[in-house]
Image (spheres, grey):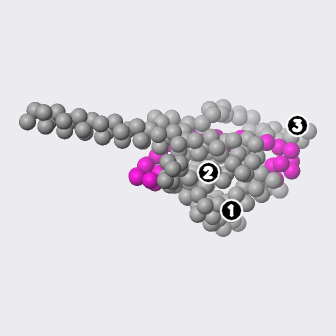
Amino acid sequence: MIKATTYLLFSIFLYFTALSSALADDNVALNKLYTHFNDAFDELDVSRLNSIYSVDACYIPESQELEIALGRDKIVELYQNFFGKVKSRNAKLEVDFRVIERNIEGTSATDIGYYLIRFHPSDDAGEPVSEFAGKFVTVARKRGDGQWNLTVDTNNKAEASFYFNASPSSNLYYGRQFSALNSLQNNQDYDND
C-alpha cells in the first residue's frame, strides 16, 4: 500500500511538473508575440506581422471609420497603410505592451493589457515626440508545432497613465519600461491630418 501511494504521489508530482513546464513555455512563446510587434513598429516592417497573426485572424480597430478586418492579409494591409503614413513623414514609431492578465485554456490564450505608441517625427519637422495609449484584448491559438498566433486582436484608446501604472505580473510581458513624456499631452493622435 505504501509503494502504491508513493507511486501515485510521484506520478502526480511529475504531471504537475510537466504541466508547469508547458505553461512556462507557452508564456515565453506568447510573450514573443509582443517582441515581434515591437520589431515591426521599430522597423516599420509589415512582413514581421505575418508571424504574429493566423491566416484567419480578425482585427477589430478602435476607429469608427474602419470595419473589422477579417484575415491576416487585411490586417497586414491596415498596418501597411499606417506604416506608410509614418514613412512618408520620415518619422519613426515605437510600441510597447504591458500584459496584466492572461488566461490559457488548452490551445487558446487570452491576453488583456495596455499599449503605448510613441511617434518620433523627423528631425527637421521641429515637432516633439508624441504618444498615445490604449487597452487591448487578444486571443491566440497554439498551432500543432507549438507556436502561437493571434486570432483576435482588438483595442481602444486609454489614458497613458494606465499603461504607466500597470503592475508587472509574473511571467507576463511587461515591455521596455518607457518613461513618461512629461512635456506632452497624453494620447495626442497624430493621424488627424
Residue shown at 58%/41% (left/top)?
32
Counting residues from the start of the chain, the first of labels 3 and 1 encountered is: 1
Who comes first in sequence, dot 1 or dot 2?
2
Q: Residues within 10 Å of mark 3 (few under 14, many from 20)?
A: few
Which structural element holds mark 1? Answer: helix
Q: Nearer the viewer, residue 168 or 153?
A: 153
Residue at coordinates 46% horizontally, 35% vertically from top-left? Answer: 170
Q: Position of residue 132 (x, y in %)?
A: 69, 46
Return the residue at label 3.
123
Residue 104 within the magenta-colored segment of the rendering: yes
- How far across and how far down the image is residue 100, in percent? 50, 42
The answer to whether residue 86 is visible is: yes
Would you say 172 lies left or right of 119 here? left
As shown in the figure, which amino acid type bears the numbered disc 1?
Asp
Element type where label 3 sits in the image? helix
Instruction: Check disc 1: other Cα within 10 Å, few if <14, some if 14-19, many if 20+.
Output: some
Please name the amino acid that badge 3 sits on: Asp
Q: How many marks?
A: 3
Q: What secondary structure is found at the residue carrying circle 2?
A: loop
Name the quarter where the C terminus is drawn.
bottom right
- Quarter of the image holding residue 73? bottom right
Disc 2 and disc 3 in contact, CB within 8 angstroms: no
Question: Against 32, is 140 above or below?
Answer: below
Q: Mark 1 sits on what residue?
A: 73
First of labels 2, 3 by sequence position:
2
